[in-house]
Image (cartoon, grey):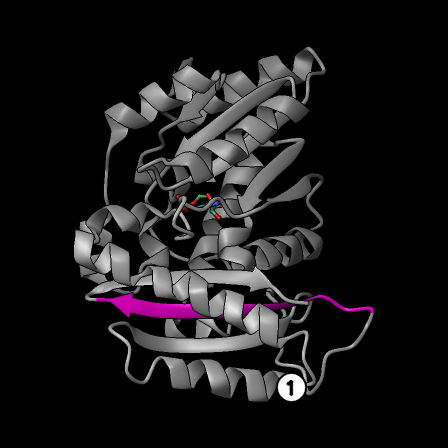
Amino acid sequence: MLVLKSRQEVADFVESVKSKKLTLGFVPTMGALHEGHLSLIKRSIEENQYTLCSIFVNPTQFNNATDLEKYPRTEETDMEKLKSIGCDAVYLPRVEDLYPSGVENDPINLNGLDVVMEGAFRPGHFQGMATVVKRFFLQVQPTRAYFGEKDFQQLQIIRQMVKEENLPLEIVGVPIIREKSGLAMSSRNMRLSPEFKEKSLFIYQTLLKAKELSDSQLSPKQIIHKIEQLYINSDLKLEYFTIAEEQTLQLPEKFEENKHYRAFIAAYAGDIRLIDNIQLR
Ligand code: AMP
């Protein structure tokens, strides 16, 4: 596996791939890799002649210094995992490779998708994420890039950014990988105590409940109310539970036949913030 440590090394790699007219799949990550990340990389390997994964903990998408500092970093085992599944190359940029003129965001029109749900609770998060992903795309010039539905809002924002900036690549969304228990895999899960890990299963259970209720006559608002009630005496602290139409990410008055909807949740297990979502109906 090639290990690329600078913008210049990536430029040389991209040039050699392009000169051979080969397809390039790209999977950006923040490391602490688990089966969720690996499913994106495996999918890219299936669909492209070359696959490049990046590992970069992007400072601009953390709105809390402690969260950035405590974000797990497991570079050695990450590299082993990437090698074992046959990833062709990994890019480990330094901050200056992505932010040569200082750490700041590019102005990108995200069409309001960035101010709801996660955006409402993590101001600036999506502008930071969109900036770094756009800069990665310009450097890597992938044929396709892979993103998990675990961060569904992020996936839709990337699609919007690619449209807005007219970038020539395909965005592929990949289903959520869960542990056997149902808990959505996340790099943050490794910071959960065994007790809170057990308690966190409630998140997926309540998403399944919402899915079941979406087949009834209840309106989206009534379902939200019922799920919120379930958290009143729970061990988890609910930050938000909501339902949104997949394209606009807006709460609908009622479900319509030809549209797709998801339930979205963010909750704290102790001091660990977890997010998850599920397609409804
Ligand atoms: P992260 O390292 O958390 O920034 O995640 C990198 C990519 O992996 C993003 O596209 C995530 O949506 C995706 N991802 C993270 N966890 C999962 C999961 N459990 N299932 C599928 N994709 C995931």
Ligand 1: which quarter? top left
Q: Using the rendered view, name the quadrant where residue 254 is placed.
A: bottom right
Q: Is residue 104 above or below residue 11?
A: below
The answer to which of 263 and 78 lies nearer the viewer is 263
Which residue is at 62% across, 77% downward? 250
Q: Is residue 193 left or right of residue 237?
A: left
Circle 1 is placed at which residue position? 218
Residue 14: x %, y % from top left? 57, 21
Q: Is residue 108 visible?
A: no
Q: Is residue 56 above or below residue 266?
A: above
Residue 47: x %, y % from top left? 67, 25
Q: Residue furthest right?
A: 258
Q: Secondary structure at mark 1?
A: loop
The C terminus lies in quadrant = bottom right
Residue 152: x %, y % from top left? 55, 57
Q: Is residue 49 above or below residue 139?
A: above
Density class for disc 1 (Cα within 10 Å; few <14, some 14-19, many ≥20) is some
Q: Is residue 206 left or right of residue 232?
A: right
Which residue is at 52% across, 71% downward? 209
Q: Using the rendered view, name the quadrant where residue 215 is placed.
A: bottom right
The answer to which of 172 and 20 lies nearer the viewer is 172
Please provide the residue range marked out in magenta.
Answer: 258-269
Q: Is residue 210 visible?
A: yes
Which residue is at 51% across, 25% downward? 52
